[in-house]
Amino acid sequence: MDVLLVANQSTLGSYYMATRQYDSVRADVLDYDQSNVTAILEYRANYTPPANPIFPSTLPSYSEFIAADRFLDRLRSLASPQHPVDVPLNVTTRMFIVASMNQIPCADHSCLGINGNKLSSSLSNITFQNPTTDVLLAYYRNMSGFYTSDFPDQPPWYYNFTAGEFWYNITVASPGTRVKMLNYNETV
């Protein structure tokens, strides 16, 4: 999820932010990384920042529906007559991308996930493999070996995307750093 933050607090200081994953289906979320994500938003001004910011003492559990619901209820859009959302009608490139949860096989089925595999997320059955060099840096410096430009326009299979049960070969993602090259101002 991308979040746009407006830094408009009248009380200058440091603000500690923390978040974690949410799973609405299962309470036993042992098969994926349970690390918390944190950041410090610090205003630049004439004040003395605290030596040690205060970390939130508790975060909701991974399956806490009420906390997730409260957060989602506060999401807002600027779409209104004053801020119209102009949807492009002349599409130049068509892509059908499937966002899904998948598995990555572990050697000897030694991981804690389903079938001894790791849980992963993917786009069109490709789970992002973090390269050793930034993708944009590699592109602008014409460096090879850090990504491939063969991200597909369509998923490898069409199936009932909302079904509860899937074939095993659909649920196993391929790791990769694959990109889709688009021209400037192209409408997708």
Image (cartoon, grey):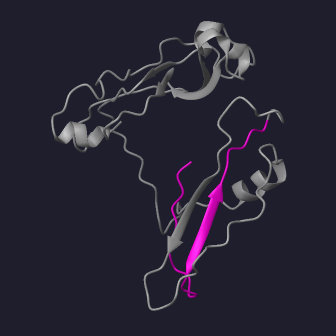
163, 64: nearer the viewer: 64
Above or below residue 50? Residue 160 is above
Quadrant in which the C terminus appears: top left
The answer to whether residue 38 is magenta is: no
Q: Horizontal and vertical percent for residue 179?
A: 33, 29
The answer to whether residue 20 is magenta is: yes
At horizontal 65% and vertical 54% (from top left) the residue drawn is: 19
Q: Is residue 40 left or right of residue 111?
A: left
At horizontal 72% and vertical 65% (from top left) the residue drawn is: 56
Q: Residue furthest left?
A: 142
How many numbered badges does the structure rendering display? 0
Q: Quick check: can you spot residue 6?
A: no
Q: Which portion, as a residue range, is magenta?
A: 1-24
Q: Quadrant of residue 90?
A: top left
Q: Quick check: can you spot residue 87?
A: yes
Q: Is residue 7 left or right of residue 103?
A: left
Magenta stretch: dominant secondary structure: loop
Above or below residue 58? Residue 46 is below
Q: Quadrant of residue 162?
A: top right
Q: Horizontal and vertical percent for residue 185?
A: 25, 44
186, 33: nearer the viewer: 33
66, 173: nearer the viewer: 173
At horizontal 82% and vertical 48% (from top left) the residue drawn is: 64
Q: Horizontal and vertical percent for residue 69?
A: 77, 53
At horizontal 29% and vertical 24% (from top left) the residue drawn is: 148
Q: Residue furthest front?
A: 51
